[in-house]
Image: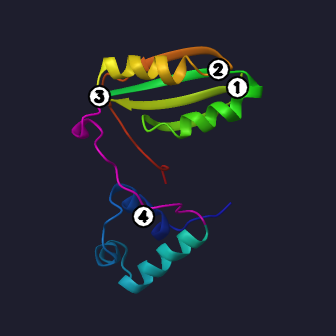
Amino acid sequence: MTVLDTIDSHILRRLAQNSRISYTDLAKEVGLSGVAVKERIERLVNQGIIEQFSIVISAEKLGKKISAYLELEVEPKHLDKIVAALKENERVAVLYEMTGACILHTHILVESIEEMEHFMNESIYSLEGLLRVENQILLKRHKNQDGLNI
């Protein structure tokens, strides 16, 4: 386990809010030079604490108005095949294997209820080894946080 000092913690919080913040702006906030901040960020990357820098894309603005969460219980012997199929599907945004009875947590983004129905019929219900499906449609997002509270 790595222990972070207050400066590294501040840098990580700010990068989680805005990964495009400049070294200069971060340096002003933490009282270091831009070079020192750059070196700290590179160290955090090299230590694997920062895994990647990314952006958040508004799926809704791109026409994906339906955000749904599926819990899929699958037969263990079919797990790898089902995971491989879902990973290749462009509608699947997130796919996690959870504890319990071989559960896959799947987040999908689609344009309409009709597209969701088509996805469920063609890409989910047709999977060999599927035991149970639960789905929920997101109504409203109250908080969205990627990363960790530092």
Front label number (2 vs 3): 3
Q: How many marks?
A: 4
Q: Which mark is residue 111?
A: 3
Note whether 77 is above or below 48 in the view shown.
above
Locate residue 43 relative to residue 136 in the image: left or right. right
Locate residue 76 relative to residue 19 in the image: left or right. right
The residue sitting at 32% across, 18% down in the picture is: 113
Q: Please tell me whether mark 4 sits on a helix, a strand or a loop.
A: helix
Q: Which mark is residue 10?
A: 4
Q: Earlier in the sequence, mark 2 or mark 1?
A: 2
Distance CA(mark 2)–CA(mark 4) = 40 Å
Q: Amino acid at mark 1?
A: Cys
Distance CA(mark 2)–CA(mark 1) = 6 Å
Front label number (1 vs 4): 1
Q: Which mark is residue 73?
A: 2
Disc 1 + disc 4, Cβ < 8 Å: no
- Residue sticking out furthest to the left: 61
Distance CA(mark 3)–CA(mark 1) = 29 Å
